[in-house]
Each structure stands twice: as C-alpha cells, then as structure tokens.
Image (spheres, grey):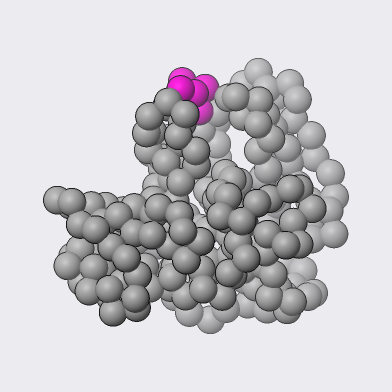
C-alpha cells in the first residue's frame, strides 16, 4: 500500500498563518480551495492539511489535529483492510470526492480521501517542498499495538512516533537540514522556539506544540 500518504488534518482559525508557519519549516502548498478554507501542504514525505475550524462540518475545534490519509485507490485499500480483519470499512462520495472510513485502535473514525484530479473550486500550488523534511506524527502510546497493526496494512510502519499514554495526535517532523538553520529561520519569522539537544520545540500560530527533530 505504498500509495497511501499520511496527512494529519489541523483545524484552525488561522489558515494563512499556519500555512506560512509550515512554509517556514519547508512545506509547500499542493492544493488550496478558492474560498481559502482548505489547503494541503506537502513535505518531502507526508502532508499536512489545514481546514478552517469555523467551516468544519464534523465538529473540528480550533487547534485540534486529527489523523487522516490520502490514497490513490481506496477500493483496493478497502479490500486489504477487510482481509486484515477490519469489518467496518465503508466508502462513500462527498462533494470533494470519494472517502473511506475505518475505525482506529481506540474506536475513532479515520478518514482516507481518494486522490482526485477534479480541481473545480481549487487551485494547484507550484512550489516544491524541502525534500529533507519528513512528517512523523506523534500518536498515543496506549494504542500502539493497534496502530502498528493498522499502519502495517497501510504500508506506513516507519512514519510515526509514539509518545506517552493519553497523548493526542501532534504534528512532528524530522529533517536532515542543520537544526541551527531551521532555528534561525523560525526565530526570524517570530516563532517561539526552544532547542533541546537535537530537537526543536515550537509553539505554532494555533498555540499548539510542534516538534522538529534533527
């Protein structure tokens, strides 16, 4: 399932500010809505989607991050998940395309959007992401075994980190760029950053912690 891409979804009242913050880390816009309420950002590996919290139809709250994915063929993915024992997989059509839903390890809904070439209402970005940056989201260690089983089906076993029991999904990145350069760029952009050894701890525009590891 190598066509599956991890794409955490951040609900935010500050889409433009979060976009600028992620661009400072090296991500670039791939697709954005003409209304400005949605933009997905490419890293060298992985993506982050920004969604206006005010227009969320699923109760997304300001600053909340949910785990989601994108895949080229969700029919094939549905077959793989069902073969692995996931019995509650469903696919349906939304206004923006087809979506697969499956339950996560703690019973949470996980959404996997099918890649869509219909750009009506959207515009493509032209920038290239920094290939040195990899998205490595933090997940709840209490559900680690369940996550590892599910992620193995998705082909994403080396893409995540597990924190402590009870941790919520958090944006984290790994980079091969010198951390001093990243720190200098973030500081110049006005972001609050703390360096601890080979880790940068940043407060993003939503007031949430983001970690970059060297």
The answer to whether one can see residue 3 in this image is no
Quarter in which the C terminus is drawn: bottom left
Find residue 5 and report its horizontal and vertical position in percent.
Answer: 54, 50
Judge by depth and name the residue closer to the eye, 135 or 83. 135
**Is residue 163 left or right of 7 when viewed as pictured?**
left
User: What residue range appears in magenta?
Assistant: 142-148
Tell me which secondary structure the magenta stretch mostly adopts. Answer: helix
| Quarter containing the N terminus | top right
Say left or right for 137 vs 1: left
Which quadrant holds residue 123? bottom right
Residue 49 is a magenta residue: no
Q: Is residue 189 visible?
A: yes
User: Is residue 170 shown above or below 150?
Assistant: below
Viewer-nearest residue: 27 or 200: 200
**Where is residue 193, by image quadrant?**
bottom left
Q: Quadrant of residue 30?
A: bottom right
Residue placed at 69% from the left, 70% from the top?
37
Q: Nearer the viewer, residue 176 or 23?
A: 23
**Residue 144, magenta (yes or no):** yes
Q: Residue at x 76, y 62 (%)?
A: 55
Provide residue 174's location: percent of width, then percent of height: 31, 53
Q: Residue at x 65, y 18 (%)?
A: 85
The residue positioned 68% from the left and 50% from the top of the image is: 60
Asked if residue 73 is positioned above or below residue 13 in the image, the reply reads above
Q: Is residue 209 above or below residue 109?
A: below
Numbered label tally: 0
174 relative to 146 in the view: left or right: left
Pinpoint residue 211: horizontal percent, then vertical percent. 34, 52
Image location of residue 119, percent across then percent down: 74, 73
């Amino acid at each position: 399932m190598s066509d599956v891409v991890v794409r955490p979804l951040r609900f935010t009242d500050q889409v433009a500010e979060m976009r600028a913050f992620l661009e400072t880390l090296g991500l670039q816009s791939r697709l954005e809505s003409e209304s400005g309420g949605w933009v997905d950002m490419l890293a060298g590996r992985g993506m982050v989607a920004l969604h206006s919290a005010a227009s969320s139809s699923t109760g997304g709250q300001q600053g909340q991050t949910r785990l989601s994915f994108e895949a080229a063929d969700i029919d094939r993915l549905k077959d793989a998940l069902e073969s692995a024992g996931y019995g509650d997989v469903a696919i349906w059509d939304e206004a923006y395309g087809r979506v697969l839903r499956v339950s996560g390890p703690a019973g949470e809904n996980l959404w996997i959007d099918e890649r869509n070439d219909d750009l009506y209402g959207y515009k493509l970005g032209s920038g290239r992401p920094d290939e040195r940056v990899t998205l490595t989201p933090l997940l709840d260690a209490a559900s680690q075994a369940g996550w590892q089983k599910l992620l193995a089906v998705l082909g994403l076993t080396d893409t995540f980190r597990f924190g402590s029991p009870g941790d919520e999904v958090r944006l984290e990145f790994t980079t091969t760029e010198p951390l001093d350069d990243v720190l200098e760029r973030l500081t110049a952009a006005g972001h609050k950053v703390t360096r601890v050894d080979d880790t940068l701890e940043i407060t993003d525009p939503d007031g949430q912690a983001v970690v970059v590891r060297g």
